[in-house]
Image (tube, helix red, strand yellow):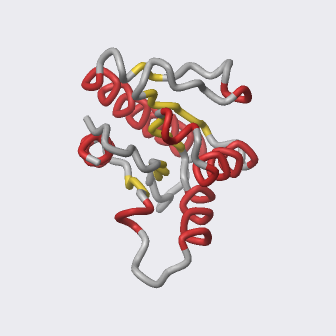
Amino acid sequence: MAIVRRVESALRGAGATPFVAEYSVAPGESLQKAIAAGINDCDLFVVLWSNHSASSDWVRQELGHAAGKNKRIVPFVLEADAKIPSFLQDTKYIRAYEDVEGGIQAIARQVQDLFATKRKQIEDRNAQGFALVIGVALVLAAFGSKES
């Protein structure tokens, strides 16, 4: 789970509020409801993609939920042979298996770009008191014994 913590830290450093079910859901709370709420509230959905996550029904469900809510989905691909789902084939993904640090920086830039876009929208509306919060749902699956 070291890679999850690294990505989460980079997102926080870029100003986002990451939702990671493993760390964000309290014991006794419904995982399904909490994850659905996290996805509903997010601006960016980052999925750490591996062969393990590709075979996870939970991850596929969460991806489907995010797609159904028209969330920006960024696959952060950890293994070169991990097949991207067909509905994401035309989505530019991060090849973290080639350069983990570069991938983490790319995710942080995505968050910074979202902030810039939201700031511009606020300026254009001349809105006051509009909260500038970027939520990121960071989805992960059990990685088995392979951790970065």
Residue 79 vs 145, above or below: the answer is above
Q: Residue furthest bottom?
A: 28
Name the residue at the top extreme: 98
Report whether 82 appears left or right of 79: right
Residue extending furthest toward the front:
145
Q: Quadrant of residue 85?
A: top right
Q: Is residue 131 above or below residue 75?
A: below
Q: Which residue is found at the position 37% from the left and 45% from the top? A: 144
Comparing 135 with 104, the one in front is 104
Q: Residue at x 54, y 52 (%)?
A: 42
For image coordinates 48% across by 34% down, the residue present is 49
Total number of numbered labels? Answer: 0
- Tell me residue 17's x, y (percent): 38, 55
In the depicted structure, whether residue 81 falls above or below residue 22: above
Q: Image point 36% across, 21% down: which residue? A: 97
Horizontal placement of 20 versus 105: left or right? right
Q: Position of residue 105 (x, y in %)?
A: 30, 27
Residue 25 lies in what quarter of the image?
A: bottom left
Quadrant occupied by the C terminus: top left
Choose between 127 and 94: the one closer to the eye: 94
Residue 121 placement: quadrant: top right
Expressed as whole percent of the image width and height from the top left, the position of residue 102 reads: 29, 20
In the picture, measured across the screen, residue 90 lies left or right of residue 98, that is right
The percent position of residue 14, horizontal first and vertical second, equals 30, 41
